[in-house]
């Protein structure tokens, strides 16, 4: 398993933590794009079932005196899913513990949306099998429209919205719904990025004149930032996804934003660059970890 890494953004340390990985159907990941076009980008990692590994990259940061966790991966409630990736999953809590961060230390949990691979670690099972919040003192921030979609799934969406990942938050009083865009702190904002789901939200982090954006499922592979029309079959509003990606890519190039992805190979961070008419992704290595990471993350 990859160890947590850090990106320094102004006065904030953004720590990327892996919950592991899941297998993702490559054809679904690239939607209507013909296989001969997308296969060269994933041939070296695709298995015999034409699946590609999707990382589960989560963020830990400290802002305004609060410890924030962005996404919780698949979690450990169901250790034997058939899509269990080559790195396994359910590693978030042990990785936090290795950093010296206990579940009760987390003040805010943010989900970009409520698909199982982004919020499965919201909850854990007790010895009796009951699902309860994994972070007992945290406010769980979820966009109201996404909550409505998750709690009223349809024939297409019910296969990825699992009630044990989010209903216990409401029952425990830890759930906080918000509308529109939302300022978590002066440095962290939840921004509107519809397409994958109608109420998907990305996370913008701004400090010292620098900006990072955690994309969630705006993309499933970084080539989808270079080729905007390559849209996953998972997206419920594909043409809206196209508009969202265009806006984010233009902003990222202009501002030199650090983009952090959920599913790109760990740590999933990079920048978009313009070379004439061509736009391309470039991985950005993390900063060196100087001193105990536990002290930096808390």
Image (spheres, helix red, strand yellow):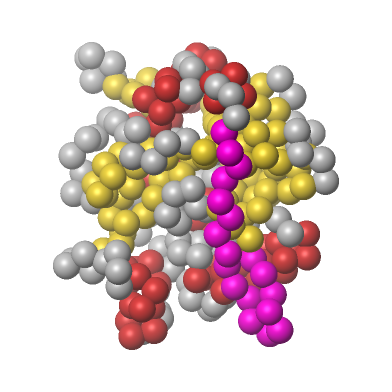
For the question of whether residue 102 can be seen, the reply is: yes
Q: Quadrant of residue 25?
A: bottom left
- Say which residue appears at 68% left-offset and 48% top-offset: 212
Q: Is residue 165 visible?
A: no
Q: Nearer the viewer, residue 81 or 41?
A: 41
Q: Is residue 25 left or right of residue 17?
A: left
Which is more toward the observer, 189 or 90?
A: 90
Q: Position of residue 10 (x, y in %)?
A: 76, 39
Location of residue 253 with respect to 164 vertically, above or below: below
Magenta stretch bounds: 272-289
Q: How far from the left and from the top, in percent, is residue 227?
A: 54, 77
Q: Looking at the picture, does residue 166 appear above or below residue 205?
A: above
Q: Position of residue 115 (x, y in %)?
A: 41, 47
Image quadrant containing the C terminus: top right
Please say if 265 is above or below 289.
below
- Residue 110 lies in the magenta-colored region: no
Residue at 18% across, 66% down: 49
* Identity of the residue drawn at 45% across and 25% down: 96
Specify whether 27 is left or right of 104.
left
Q: Give the side of residue 79 with respect to residue 215, left or right.
A: left
Residue 118 on image: x %, y %: 44, 43
Residue most toward the right? 209
284 is within the stretch colored magenta = yes
Give the mark count. Answer: 0
Which residue is located at x 33 percent, y 39 percent?
1
Q: Quadrant of residue 3?
A: top left
């Amino acid at each position: 398993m990859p160890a947590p890494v850090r990106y320094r953004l102004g006065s904030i340390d953004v720590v990327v933590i892996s919950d592991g990985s899941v297998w993702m159907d490559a054809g679904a990941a690239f939607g209507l794009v013909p296989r001969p076009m997308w296969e060269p980008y994933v041939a070296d990692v695709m298995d015999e079932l034409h699946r590609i590994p999707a990382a589960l990259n989560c963020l830990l940061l400290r802002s305004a005196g609060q410890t924030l966790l962005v996404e919780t991966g698949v979690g450990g409630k169901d250790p034997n899913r058939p899509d269990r990736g080559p790195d396994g999953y359910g590693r978030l809590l042990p990785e936090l513990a290795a950093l010296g961060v206990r579940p009760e230390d987390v003040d805010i949990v943010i989900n970009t949306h409520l698909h199982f691979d982004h919020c499965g670690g919201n909850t854990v099972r007790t010895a009796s099998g009951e699902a309860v919040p994994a972070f007992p003192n945290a406010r769980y921030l979820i966009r109201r429209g996404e909550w409505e979609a998750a709690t009223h799934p349809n024939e297409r969406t019910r296969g990825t919205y699992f009630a044990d990942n989010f209903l216990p938050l409401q029952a425990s009083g830890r759930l906080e719904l918000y509308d529109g865009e939302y300022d978590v702190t002066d440095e962290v904002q939840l921004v509107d990025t519809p397409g994958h789901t109608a109420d998907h939200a990305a996370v913008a982090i701004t400090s010292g004149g620098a900006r990072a954006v955690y994309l969630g499922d705006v993309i499933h592979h970084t080539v989808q930032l270079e080729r905007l029309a390559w849209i996953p079959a998972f997206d419920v509003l594909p043409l809206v996804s196209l508009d969202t990606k265009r806006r984010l890519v233009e902003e990222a190039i202009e501002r030199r934003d650090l983009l952090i992805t959920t599913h790109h190979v760990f740590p999933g961070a990079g920048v978009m660059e313009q070379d004439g008419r061509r736009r391309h992704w470039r991985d950005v290595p993390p900063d060196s970890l100087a001193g105990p990471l536990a002290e930096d993350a808390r």
